[in-house]
């Protein structure tokens, strides 16, 4: 019996190519791979999978406990599994079981220091070879290596790792408990295979573990080390993975920095630089950026020259990136970032066939996506849905239901059309959403039933009134009629018990949106109408009393709630409800002791509604401006939102002008910050028109232009002082010196 241990770099195309060649030469009876044994039964699906994919192991009894073992097309372990499937050889996984990994509450153990030998053995090997970049050294030695005896390569890797482990131990390194158990589990797997009488066994594992597996110590020590480990019930399946999740930046410990580049190395056997630059140029042209064939040729030549200067036989990613930046990107980092995202890293999403076992909720999601022709993708994608169309409306339902389940595949964006039938989304699928689907399987077997159960549960647990109203709106958007009765009942109960009028008013906008736009989604909203009507009755009865004795913060909250409720009633209120609401506002406007900012806003709303004449509004403004320190707050509420009234109403303008002119210097300094805050809410054109009006008023005086009785001249005008600067102004404007 012969056991050959092939030490690899996880997700290395050179290692993957060497593994395929070594397995062809060895023709093993059994292939053992570093990984959880629970993945063994899943190997029958290998030929139907499209990488990147991952083995997902999760604990059904412990929501949130899950682990992934990703594979790319260029992963040595994946190619070993593919070889076994094609050659009809049995394959097993011999690492620690996922049941043990998920039961470990202590995490993954102490990670070695990055600058230690065990933390980055490749860096130490590259330095020993005279290189300062381990990635570039590994590319030269392994990834760009074509031909030769693969078994010699693995023998050299084993020898190098043995020396590194000896040096690390001499430097004080000791393996962590988890690493010791992992290597013990792999040795036990090799022993079990040996007892079956196989003549040739091939073991594929990380290069660092090769010395620990090359010789087998007495089995008793390993058995003692593995005895008594806690376990949990585990279920395993295949899930799609993304290229981005194969990177170090995603938090994946065994990741690589450039999975898209490694995929290119794996799929390209010749003219690597030329084919890479051709892909870069095609991407730039697709984005309407200049990338001519001549510039592509120049890019390849520059990359080859840089590689020669750096002593490399072939251009690597660093040389190609430098050349692309200099020639195709003309030194601009923006298109280079595009190339890095779409080519160097990549946006590939793997494919898992339908017959792979999974939970019913995930199966329903996948079936729904197929029915709607709405497949997940790893890249960002903008879509605009027309809710008048059945397919788009169903897609919108799906996205909203997923959000209720905590799966944020899509984020709502502003649609191009302002109509109520348009809905814009920004989509991007992440692999961890599969875990979320599995965890939410306890709520139901379909996306709709699970989302309805989640909404019902949240309605019963919600402590804040606003949380329940948000659930009503979310339930309508997701089209969950089964959940609406429970949510509206909870809303009715909370509204009956609360005496906070501001909270009741804050609940109005989402309910109004449900009533106004629910018909677009063909949702029955009669339950919501009854809740809104009862809430509005309580608001109108309690608004004046709720506006008494409020501090500044509470007054600001009341003001925001009042404006939100006003917009909601304008959207869906009947004539009777609008009249009751205006009566409540008038009660606040006439109430002594109400916050000035709220009173001013109520007066403005009544004026806009035609329930106060301009003369009545001016009288109230005059009384407010005579109240001293409260005048600015009243004015802020009155002018809030739009300055058009102030621009068009000259008596109101003059009244405000007289009040400001009559302030003392100290009073003006105190009022100025508040006035700036009030006027900053006006639009830019409104502020400019106010400036023009102020300048015109200063030039002509309050009596109007000269032909209407005004002097047309400021009494303080000093012609001699003005003449002193005329020459300078004339020269600055390109003219000649003014005559005396």
Image (cartoon, rainbow, N blue to C red):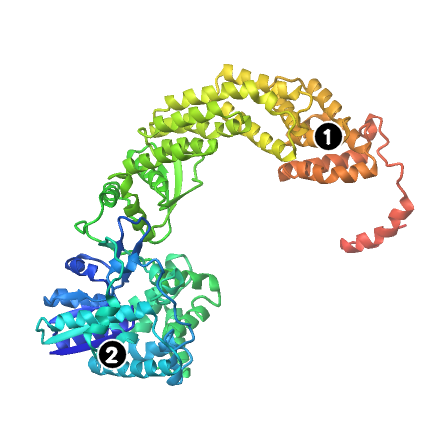
The quadrant of the rendering that contains the N terminus is bottom left
Q: Position of residue 492 (x, y in %)?
A: 43, 24
Q: Which residue is mark 2?
A: 146
Residue depicted at x 38% and y 70%:
294
Residue 145, above or below 407: below
Residue depicted at x 67% and y 32%:
636
Q: Position of residue 232 (x, y in %)?
A: 25, 54
Q: Nearer the viewer, mark 1 or mark 2?
A: 1
Q: CA distance from mark 1 to mark 2?
A: 84 Å
Residue 528 quadrant: top left
Mark 1 vs mark 2: which is more N-terminal? 2
Left or right: 650, with 100 as reference point? right
Asked if one can make out residue 597 in the rendered structure from this viewpoint, the answer is: yes
Left or right: 117, with 655 as reference point? left
* Element marked by disc 1: helix
Residue depicted at x 73% and y 20%:
619
Number of numbered tags placed on the structure image: 2
Q: Position of residue 194 (x, y in %)?
A: 12, 73
* Element marked by disc 2: loop
Residue 488 quadrant: top left
Q: Which mark is residue 630?
A: 1
- Mark 1 closeness class: few <14, some 14–19, many ≥20 residues within 10 Å: some
């Amino acid at each position: 019996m012969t056991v050959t241990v092939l030490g690899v770099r996880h997700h290395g195309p050179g290692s993957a190519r060497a593994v395929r060649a070594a397995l062809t030469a060895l023709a093993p009876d059994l292939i053992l791979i570093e990984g959880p044994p629970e993945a063994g039964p899943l190997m029958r699906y290998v030929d139907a999978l499209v990488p990147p994919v991952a083995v997902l192991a999760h604990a059904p009894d412990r929501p949130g406990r899950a682990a992934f073992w990703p594979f790319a097309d260029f992963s040595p372990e994946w190619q070993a599994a593919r070889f076994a499937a094609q050659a009809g050889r049995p394959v097993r996984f011999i690492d620690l079981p996922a049941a043990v990994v998920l039961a470990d509450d202590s995490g993954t153990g102490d990670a070695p220091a990055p600058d230690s030998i065990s933390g980055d053995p490749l860096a130490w090997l590259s330095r020993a070879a005279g290189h300062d970049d381990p990635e570039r050294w590994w590319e030269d030695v392994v990834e760009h290596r074509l031909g030769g005896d693969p078994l010699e390569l693995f023998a050299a890797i084993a020898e190098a790792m043995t020396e590194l482990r000896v040096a690390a131990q001499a430097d004080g390194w000791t393996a962590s408990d988890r690493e010791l158990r992992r290597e013990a589990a792999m040795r036990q797997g090799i022993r079990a295979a040996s007892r079956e009488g196989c003549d040739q066994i091939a073991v594929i594992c990380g290069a660092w573990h090769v010395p620990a597996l090359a010789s087998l110590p007495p089995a008793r020590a390993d058995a003692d080390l593995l005895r008594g480990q806690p376990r949990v019930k585990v279920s395993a399946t295949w899930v799609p993975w993304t290229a981005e999740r194969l990177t170090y930046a995603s938090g994946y410990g065994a990741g690589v920095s450039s999975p898209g580049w490694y995929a290119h190395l794996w799929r390209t056997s010749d003219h690597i630089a030329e084919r890479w630059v051709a892909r870069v140029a095609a991407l730039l042209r697709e984005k309407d950026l200049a990338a001519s064939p001549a510039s592509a040729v120049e890019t390849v030549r520059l990359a080859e020259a840089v590689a020669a200067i750096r002593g490399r036989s072939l251009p690597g990613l660093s040389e190609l990136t430098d050349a692309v930046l200099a020639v195709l990107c003309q030194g601009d980092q923006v298109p280079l970032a595009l190339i890095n995202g779409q080519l160097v890293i990549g946006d590939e999403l793997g494919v898992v066939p339908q017959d792979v076992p999974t939970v019913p909720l995930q199966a329903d999601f996948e079936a729904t996506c197929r029915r709607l022709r709405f497949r997940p993708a790893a890249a960002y994608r903008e879509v605009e849905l027309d809710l008048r169309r059945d397919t788009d409306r169903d897609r919108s339902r799906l996205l909203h239901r997923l959000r209720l389940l905590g799966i944020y595949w899509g984020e709502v964006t502003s649609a191009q059309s302002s109509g109520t039938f348009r809905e814009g989304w920004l989509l991007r699928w992440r692999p961890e959403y599969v875990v979320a689907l599995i965890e939410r399987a306890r709520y139901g077997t379909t996306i709709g039933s699970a989302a309805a159960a989640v909404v019902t549960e949240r309605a019963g647990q919600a402590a804040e009134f606003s949380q329940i109203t948000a659930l009503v709106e979310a339930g309508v958007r997701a089209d969950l009629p089964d959940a609406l009765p429970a949510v509206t009942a909870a809303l009715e109960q909370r509204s009956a018990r609360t005496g906070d009028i501001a909270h009741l008013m804050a609940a109005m906008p989402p309910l109004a949106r449900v009533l106004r736009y629910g018909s677009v989604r063909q949702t029955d909203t009669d339950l919501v109408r009854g809740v809104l009507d009862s809430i509005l009755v309580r608001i109108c009865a309690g608004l004046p009393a709720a506006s008494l004795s409020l501090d500044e913060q509470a007054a600001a909250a009341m003001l925001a709630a009042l404006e939100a409720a006003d917009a909601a009633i304008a959207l869906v209120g009947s004539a009777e409800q609008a009249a009751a609401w205006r009566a409540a506002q008038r009660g606040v406007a006439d109430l002594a002791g109400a916050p000035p900012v709220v009173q001013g806003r109520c007066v403005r709303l009544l004026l806009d509604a035609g329930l106060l004449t301009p003369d009545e509004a001016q009288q109230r403004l005059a009384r407010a401006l005579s109240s001293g320190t409260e005048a600015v707050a009243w004015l802020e509420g009155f002018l809030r939102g739009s300055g058009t009234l102030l621009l068009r109403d000259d008596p109101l303008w003059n009244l405000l002008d007289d009040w400001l002119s009559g302030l003392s210097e100290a009073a003006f300094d105190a009022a100025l910050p508040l006035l700036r805050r009030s006027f900053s809410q006006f639009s830019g054109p409104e502020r400019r028109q106010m400036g023009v009006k102020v300048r015109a008023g200063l030039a002509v005086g309050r009596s109007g232009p000269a032909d209407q009785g005004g002097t047309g001249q400021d009494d303080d005008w000093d012609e001699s002082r003005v003449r002193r600067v005329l020459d300078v102004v004339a020269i600055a404007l390109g003219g000649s010196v003014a005559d005396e």
